Image (cartoon, rainbow, N blue to C red):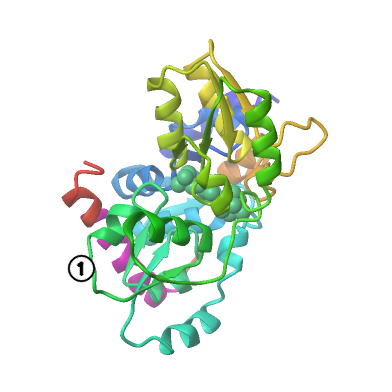
Amino acid sequence: MDLKNEILRLKDEKNAVILAHFYQIPEIQDIADYIGDSLGLAQKAEQTDADIIVFSGVHFMAETAKILNPGKKVVLPDLNAGCSLADACPPEEFAAFRQKHPDHMVISYINCTAGIKALSDVICTSSNAVPVVEYFPEGQPIIFAPDKNLGGYVNKVTGRNMVLWDGTCEVHDVLETEAVIRMKADNPDAKLIAHPECKAPVLEIADFIGSTTAMLKYTVKDDAEKYIVATETGILHQMKKKSPQKEFLIVPTNDTCSCNDCPYMKMNTMQKLYLCMKNEHPQIILDEELMEKSRKPIERMLEISRELNIIK
Ligand code: 13P
Ligand code: SF4
């Protein structure tokens, strides 16, 4: 079967839109209506007039699309496509943690479950975390969850002292500082670009830090010819497409190691994408009250991002 043609046929027949994250396999990126970072994907999900949202990413992303579109069908190729950051922050434990800091507001990274979003005042993504935190007055006590690396980075940039939940992304947190230093020494002409989910010592030596979209834009505009890329491998597809003359080295470069392939993102295949569109299953189903509670902080993030001209 020609999966690509069948997926395109089903898309027209069902008035579906395919939203994909940059960490998806190249074939899926090439067939998607929109590829982007978490903020771009949330915004597209908010604006779509399609009847079915096919979300090729991980569970919390499809969940966010459903929360913003409670009346639409949202399908995900593999319901088991989770996220170590979301798993690191169970709602019951987080509710108890929040109770210990009653005067703190909660800013949560979008990489969390609907249960955590419902316990948050505002959501942020890697592309707007710094301005979202700075939006609130300097003396405002804040809990930041669930990524301690992103939270630590935001604390450093803003001079705030947010209380951090102890979660990490298993893909970015394993990128070793020693390997990065070695690569920089071997490639003195290359610039190091890193995702803020990386550990602090990697971020400290980076030439540029940003979300997947921000990194991609940087490699297009910047005049270097070579980049050491500290994030998940999927983004290389777009970097190479947009700048075929440039060289991109992923950390680590060892060909036998695929530890910076996100095992959850890579659960989605063309076959599963086709089947979820054909069967309109598996679907994201959420409790109405949970959707209501978790929608407010997501909408607040989108409003703040519009007010600050981060998105239109
Ligand atoms: P962004 O694409 O928003 O930078 O997020 C990266 C990521 O880890 C998504 O799970
Ligand atoms: Fe979660 Fe990390 Fe995978 Fe993103 S790359 S989905 S943060 S485990």
Q: Is residue 289 magenta?
A: yes
Residue stretch in magenta: 287-303
Q: Is residue 14 visible?
A: no
- When asked about the image quadrant of residue 121, the answer is bottom left
**Which residue shows up at 29% across the image and 57% down it?**
132
Residue 128 vs residue 274, the one in the foreground: 128
Residue 212 versus residue 188 in the image, above or below: below
> Can you give x and y, in whole percent of width and height, for residue 2 in the image?
66, 23
Residue 103 vs residue 153, the one in the foreground: 153
**Which residue shows up at 47% across the image and 39% down it?**
212
Label 1 CA crowd tier, 10 Å (few <14, some 14–19, many 20+): few
> Can you give x and y, in whole percent of width and height, for residue 37 in the image?
44, 42
Q: Is residue 159 magenta?
A: no
Q: Secondary structure at mark 1?
A: loop
Identify the residue at the far left of this view.
Answer: 307
> Can you give x and y, in whole percent of width and height, for residue 136 in the image?
23, 66
| Amino acid carrying mark 1 in the image | Pro
Q: Which residue is mark 1?
A: 137
The quadrant in which the C terminus is found is top left
> Can you give x and y, in whole percent of width and height, for residue 263 in the image?
70, 48
Magenta region, mostly helix, strand or loop?
A: helix
Residue 100 vs residue 233, the one in the foreground: 100
